[in-house]
Image (tube, rainbow, N blue to C red):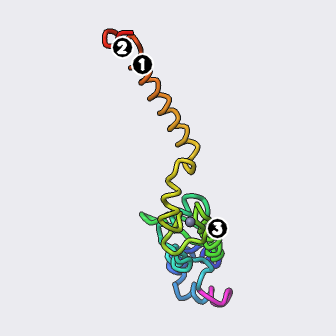
């Protein structure tokens, strides 16, 4: 039970309280049975330091379901999350795959996320790179504009202004 609790991220104090022993006794049990008092998981801070990305990026990856915690629980107002150490390589893979320019495919320099250069950024703003949804909206707008224009130019509206 002590080992299981430690594995799921409980502090020595929490375990001591749960089994009704001292913190020192918990430490002894852990060292005797596992050789260490450390659990095999990373905190979120350790994870983003090891992965070399920001805390917000970790949260984004977590929200997008790209990385999954080994354990998470809420205590009071705190939400605790622990990570397997192999999550670091998962994050590496994810960013390496994405780290090419959207337009030319060149590897992106540090600090660049979508386009490798201003030139590729400008290219990326062109109509042909817009999403299908954006193109559909654009066509709808043109159609509506042409219909309004047709209405404005109809003989009914222009009656009296132009003699045929
Ligand atoms: Zn590029």
User: Which residue reaches farthest right?
Assistant: 33
| In front of the other: 158 or 112 | 158
Residue 81: x, y in percent?
54, 68
- Would you name the residue on which mark 3 appears? 97
| In front of the other: 99 or 68 | 99
Residue 113 higher or lower than 52, as above or below: above
Position of the C terminus, as image quadrant, is top left
Residue range highlighted in magenta: 30-37
- Would you name the residue on which mark 1 appears? 151
Marks 1 and 2 sit apart, C-alpha to C-alpha, by 8 Å
First along the sequence among labels 3 and 1:
3
Per the image, is 31 magenta? yes
- Say the numbered circle drawn on residue 157: 2
The reply to whether discs 1 and 2 touch (Cβ–Cβ < 8 Å) is yes
Residue 55 higher or lower than 156, as above or below: below
The structure residue drawn at horizontal position 42% and vertical position 19%, both measured from the top left corner, is 151
Residue 143: x, y in percent?
50, 29
Residue 21 higher or lower than 142, as above or below: below
Mark 2 element type: helix
Position of the N terminus, as image quadrant, is bottom right
Marks 3 and 1 sit apart, C-alpha to C-alpha, by 51 Å
Residue mark closest to the camera, 3 vs 1: 1
């Amino acid at each position: 039970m002590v080992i299981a609790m430690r594995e799921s991220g409980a502090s020595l104090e929490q375990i001591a309280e749960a089994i009704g022993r001292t913190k020192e006794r918990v430490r002894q049990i852990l060292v005797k049975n596992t050789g260490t008092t450390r659990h095999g998981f990373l905190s979120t801070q350790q994870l983003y330091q090891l992965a070399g990305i920001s805390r917000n990026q970790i949260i984004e990856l977590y929200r997008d379901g790209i990385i999954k915690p080994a354990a998470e629980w809420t205590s009071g107002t705190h939400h605790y999350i622990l990570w397997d150490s192999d999550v670091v390589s998962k994050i590496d893979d994810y960013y390496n795959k994405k780290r090419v320019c959207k337009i030319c495919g060149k590897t992106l320099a540090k600090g660049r996320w979508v386009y490798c250069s201003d030139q590729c950024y400008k290219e990326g703003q062109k109509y042909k790179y817009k999403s299908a949804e954006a193109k559909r909206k654009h066509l709808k707008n043109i159609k509506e504009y042409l219909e309004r224009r047709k209405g404005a130019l109809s003989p009914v509206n222009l009656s009296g202004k132009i003699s045929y």
